[in-house]
C-alpha cells in the first residue's frame, strides 16, 4: 500500500498540480483537437493507432468528461504522388483509389470507436475552395517567392516527374530501386539529383533536366518568429518534438515549394500555373480547417479566437509540417490561432520490422476487427501500454497476448469479477453498509484519489502510457487488498467485516469504471452498467463513497477473455506468409531496364577476382569494404553485403567484378568496381561465382 507520510505529501502535491492544470485548462473556453489526416492509399494500421489516433481519442474523451467544449476533427488526405502511382498500377483513376480507402478508413474508425466530431476528405470541393482561398491570401500579401529550377522530365511521357516517379541506385548504400526522395533499403532521405543512373518509373526512360517555375514559402523569413514562439515560448513541448524543431531552426530554414507539376490535387489558383497543383503538405493541414467548417457554422470561434486551445496529434514524420511549416502559413495568413501543443509520438514497428503500407507489412485495423470481434479495448490497451511516446517501440503478437492475459484478464478483469461474484455470494448482490475502517481499508481507499489525480496530471501532460499505469495501479491495489483481507475466510466468523471489505472493493470498482473510460470506453461502460451509472464525469471519480449502500449490483460478467496460443499462431503465420510474398514480389516485380545495344554490353569488363580482405564500414549496417585481387591489380570495392555476410565468410571467395566501372565515393571510401550478386526469393544474397576455381582476371563474357 502507498499510505504513508511520504505519499500523503506526494498526494497533496499532486492535488495542487491538478488544480493548477485544471485552472489553466479553464482559461480556454473551447478546445480544437486535430488528428493527422491518414493517407488514403491504404487502410489504417496499428502504427497509425498507437502514434496518433488512440492518444488523441483518450485526450478528447478526458476533455469531454470534464465538460469541455471540444471539437475533434480529422479526414482523409487524398492528394499526392503515391496515390497517382497506385492508380497507374491498378489501371484506375486517383479518385477511384481515394474513394475506396476513404470509406475503409472512415468505417474502421467508427467500428473501433474513435469519436470524431467530423471526418472529412481533401478531395471535396469545399476543401479545394478553402485551400485555394488560403493560397490566394498569401499570394496577394506577397508571402511567396517565385523560383525557376531544373527538375527531371520524362520526354516520352511528356511530363515532369515527382520524386516518387524516379528510381535509381542509392548513393548512400548502393542499393538499386531507391526513390527520388528516399531509399527504402537504408532509410536515407534523398533528392532526385543524388540518384545514380536515374530512370522514370513511368516509361523506364532516362529523364532529362528541364526548367520549371514554382512558388515557395520562404521559411527563412519566419525563422525569428519560430525561434521565439517555439524555442522560447514552448519549452514544455515533448523533448522529441522540441528537439527536432530546434535542430531544424538551428540549421537554418530554407524556402519550401508549395506547388508541383502534377495533374492530381488542388490547382494552383493563379495565372500561368497550368498543370500545377498545391503541394500536398500545403493543402493537407488546411484540411483541419475544412473539416471544422463542415461540422459547425461557428468554426471561426475555434480557429480565430484566442479563447480556443488548438492541439495537433501527429507522428514524428509530421513534426516539421505541424510545428514549423503550418504555423508559418497560419502566421503569414494572419487570421488564425497557432497550436498550443503538438504531442507527436515516435514510430511503432511490427515484429522487429518497419511497418509499411506499400509492402503490406502491417496489422490492419479493419482485419483486426474481424479476427478479434468485440475486443477493441484489448488493442487500445496494448497500444497505449506500449505507446512509442519517447522512442520507437515494437508490437509483437506474443506481447499482445501476454498483456491481455496477464494484465487485462488477470488484474483488471479478475478484480472486478471477484468483487461482483463475492457481492452476490455474500451480500445478495447489494452494496453492503460499512461500519468501520481499519488502517488497511483507509490505505486502499486513498488509492482511489491518488489514481484519479495522477491520471489527470499525466493525461494533461500527454503522458498517456503513465496515465494508464495509474489506473492499473488502482486495480492492482484492489486485488492485493482483496487477497490480504480474505473475506472468504472471514464470512463464517465476521459477516460485518466481510461487508466492510466488499463495500470498499465496490467503491474501487465503480471508480475504475470512470477513470478507465478515456482508455477503455467499452470496458468502462460495462462496469458502469453493473451499478446503474451512466454519463459519468471525471470529477465524480476519486470519491471514496461514490456508491450508496443498498444499490443493486448487476450480475457478474467477464470483461475480457483469455487469448489462446492458436489465435496468436494464426496471426504470426499470416505475417510470415506476407513476408514470403513480399520477398517473391520484390524480385518478380523488378521492372526490366531500358534496352541496350550489344556494344553497351561488350563495353563492360567483368572478371573473376578473389577477396583478399574484408571489413565492415563503420556507422553503416550494410556496407563492407573489400580488397580484391582482380588479376590485373588489387583494388578496393565497397559493397552492400554486410547484412548478409561476416567479413570472415567473404575472405577467400571468388567473385565476379565489373572492373571498368567509373569509381565513386561511398562513406569517404573510393569504390573501384562492383561485384555481382544474386538475390533469392527470401531476400538472401548469393555471390555470382565460378563453379570451380579459376585464375584471377579470367573474363566473363
Image (cartoon, rainbow, N blue to C red):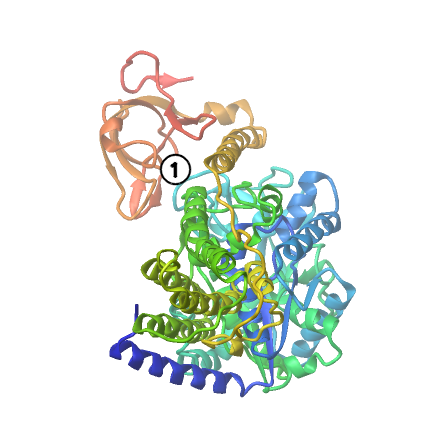
Q: Quadrant of the C terminus?
A: top left
Residue at the image point whose x is 48% and y is 72% from the top: 433
Q: Residues within 10 Å of mark 1 (few under 14, many from 20)?
A: few
Q: Is residue 2 left or right of residue 61?
A: left
Residue at the image point whose x is 70% and y is 63% from the top: 120
Is residue 180 visible in the rendered structure shown here? yes
Query: Residue 474: horizontal and vertical position, in percent?
Result: 40, 65
Which residue is tagged 1?
662
Q: Quadrant of the N terminus?
A: bottom left
Q: Quadrant of residue 386?
A: bottom left
Question: Of 433 and 281, which appears nearest the observer?
Answer: 433
Is residue 466 visible in the rendered structure shown here? no
* 41 shown above or below 638: below
Secondary structure state at the residue bearing disc 1: loop
Residue lying farthest top? 692
Q: Is residue 11 left or right of residue 256?
A: left
Question: Of 601 and 229, which appears nearest the observer?
Answer: 229
Residue lying farthest front? 493
Query: Residue 229: horizontal and vertical position, in percent?
Result: 46, 82
Query: Residue 465: horizontal and vertical position, in percent?
Result: 42, 63
Numbered circles on residues, count: 1
* 217 shown above or below 200: below
Residue at the image point whose x is 32% and y is 23% from the top: 655
Question: Of 576 and 242, which appears nearest the observer?
Answer: 576
Query: Residue 257: horizontal and vertical position, in percent?
Result: 58, 65
Question: Of 535 and 230, which appears nearest the observer?
Answer: 535
Amino acid at each position: 500500500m502507498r499510505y504513508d507520510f511520504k505519499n500523503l505529501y506526494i498526494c497533496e502535491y499532486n492535488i495542487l498540480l491538478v488544480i493548477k492544470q485544471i485552472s489553466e485548462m479553464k482559461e480556454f473556453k473551447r478546445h480544437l483537437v486535430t488528428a493527422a489526416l491518414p493517407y488514403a492509399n491504404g487502410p489504417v494500421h496499428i502504427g497509425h493507432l498507437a502514434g496518433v489516433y488512440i492518444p488523441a481519442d483518450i485526450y478528447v474523451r478526458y476533455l469531454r468528461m470534464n465538460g469541455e467544449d471540444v471539437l475533434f476533427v480529422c479526414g482523409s488526405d487524398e492528394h499526392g504522388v503515391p496515390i497517382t502511382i497506385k492508380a497507374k498500377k491498378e489501371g484506375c483513376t486517383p479518385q477511384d483509389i481515394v474513394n475506396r480507402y476513404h470509406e475503409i478508413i472512415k468505417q474502421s474508425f467508427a467500428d473501433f470507436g474513435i469519436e470524431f466530431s467530423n471526418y472529412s476528405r481533401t478531395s471535396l470541393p469545399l476543401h479545394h475552395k478553402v485551400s485555394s482561398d488560403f493560397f490566394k491570401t498569401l499570394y496577394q500579401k506577397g508571402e511567396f517567392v517565385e523560383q525557376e529550377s531544373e527538375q527531371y522530365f520524362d520526354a516520352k511521357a511528356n511530363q515532369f516527374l515527382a520524386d516518387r516517379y524516379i528510381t535509381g541506385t542509392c548513393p548512400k548504400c548502393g542499393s538499386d530501386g531507391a526513390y527520388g526522395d528516399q531509399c527504402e533499403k537504408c532509410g536515407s532521405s534523398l533528392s532526385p539529383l543524388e540518384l545514380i543512373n536515374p530512370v522514370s518509373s513511368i516509361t523506364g526512360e532516362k529523364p532529362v533536366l528541364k526548367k520549371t517555375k514554382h512558388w515557395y514559402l520562404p521559411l527563412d523569413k519566419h525563422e525569428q518568429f519560430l525561434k521565439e514562439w517555439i524555442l522560447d515560448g514552448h519549452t514544455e513541448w515533448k523533448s522529441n518534438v522540441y528537439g527536432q524543431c530546434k535542430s531544424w531552426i538551428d540549421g537554418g530554414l530554407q524556402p519550401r515549394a508549395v506547388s508541383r507539376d502534377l495533374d492530381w490535387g488542388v490547382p494552383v489558383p493563379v495565372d500561368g500555373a497550368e498543370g500545377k497543383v498545391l503541394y500536398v503538405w500545403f493543402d493537407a493541414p488546411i484540411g483541419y480547417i475544412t473539416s471544422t467548417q463542415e461540422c459547425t457554422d461557428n468554426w471561426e470561434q475555434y480557429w480565430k479566437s484566442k479563447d480556443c486551445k488548438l492541439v495537433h496529434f501527429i507522428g514524428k514524420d509530421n513534426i516539421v509540417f505541424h510545428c514549423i511549416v503550418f504555423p508559418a502559413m497560419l502566421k503569414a495568413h494572419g487570421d488564425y490561432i497557432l497550436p498550443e501543443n503538438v504531442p507527436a509520438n515516435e514510430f511503432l514497428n511490427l515484429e522487429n520490422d518497419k511497418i509499411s503500407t506499400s509492402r503490406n507489412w502491417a496489422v490492419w485495423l479493419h482485419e483486426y476487427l474481424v479476427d478479434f470481434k468485440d475486443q477493441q479495448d484489448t488493442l487500445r490497451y496494448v497500444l497505449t501500454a506500449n505507446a512509442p511516446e519517447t522512442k520507437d517501440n515494437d508490437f509483437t503478437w506474443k506481447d499482445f497476448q501476454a498483456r491481455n492475459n496477464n494484465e487485462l484478464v488477470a488484474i483488471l478483469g479478475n478484480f472486478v469479477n471477484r468483487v461482483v461474484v463475492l457481492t452476490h455470494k455474500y451480500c445478495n448482490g447489494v452494496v453492503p453498509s460499512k461500519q468501520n475502517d481499519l488502517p488497511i481499508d483507509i490505505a486502499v481507499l486513498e488509492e482511489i484519489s491518488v489514481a484519479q489525480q495522477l491520471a489527470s496530471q499525466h493525461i494533461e501532460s500527454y503522458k498517456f502510457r503513465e496515465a494508464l499505469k495509474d489506473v492499473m495501479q488502482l486495480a492492482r491495489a484492489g486485488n492485493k487488498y482483496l487477497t490480504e483481507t480474505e473475506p472468504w475466510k472471514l464470512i463464517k466468523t465476521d459477516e460485518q467485516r466481510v461487508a466492510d471489505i466488499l463495500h470498499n472493493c465496490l467503491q474501487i470498482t465503480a471508480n475504475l469504471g470512470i477513470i478507465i473510460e478515456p482508455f477503455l470506453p467499452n470496458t468502462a461502460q460495462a462496469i458502469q452498467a453493473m451499478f446503474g451509472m451512466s454519463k459519468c464525469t471525471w470529477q465524480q471519480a476519486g470519491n471514496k463513497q461514490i456508491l450508496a449502500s443498498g444499490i443493486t449490483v448487476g450480475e457478474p460478467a467477464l470483461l475480457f477473455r483469455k487469448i489462446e496460443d492458436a489465435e496468436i499462431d494464426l496471426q504470426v503465420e499470416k505475417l510470415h506468409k506476407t513476408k514470403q510474398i513480399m520477398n517473391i514480389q520484390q524480385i518478380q516485380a523488378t521492372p526490366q531496364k531500358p534496352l541496350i545495344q550489344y556494344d553497351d554490353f561488350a563495353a563492360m569488363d567483368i572478371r573473376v577476382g578473389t577477396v583478399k580482405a574484408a571489413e565492415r564500414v563503420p556507422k553503416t549496417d550494410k556496407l563492407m569494404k573489400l580488397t580484391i585481387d582482380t588479376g590485373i591489380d588489387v583494388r578496393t570495392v565497397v559493397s552492400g553485403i554486410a547484412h548478409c555476410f561476416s567479413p570472415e565468410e567473404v575472405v577467400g571467395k571468388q567473385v565476379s567484378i565489373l572492373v571498368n566501372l567509373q569509381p565513386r565515393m561511398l562513406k569517404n571510401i573510393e569504390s573501384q568496381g562492383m561485384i555481382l550478386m544474386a538475390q533469392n526469393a527470401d531476400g538472401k544474397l548469393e555471390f555470382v561465382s565460378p563453379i570451380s576455381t579459376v585464375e584471377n582476371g579470367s573474363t566473363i563474357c
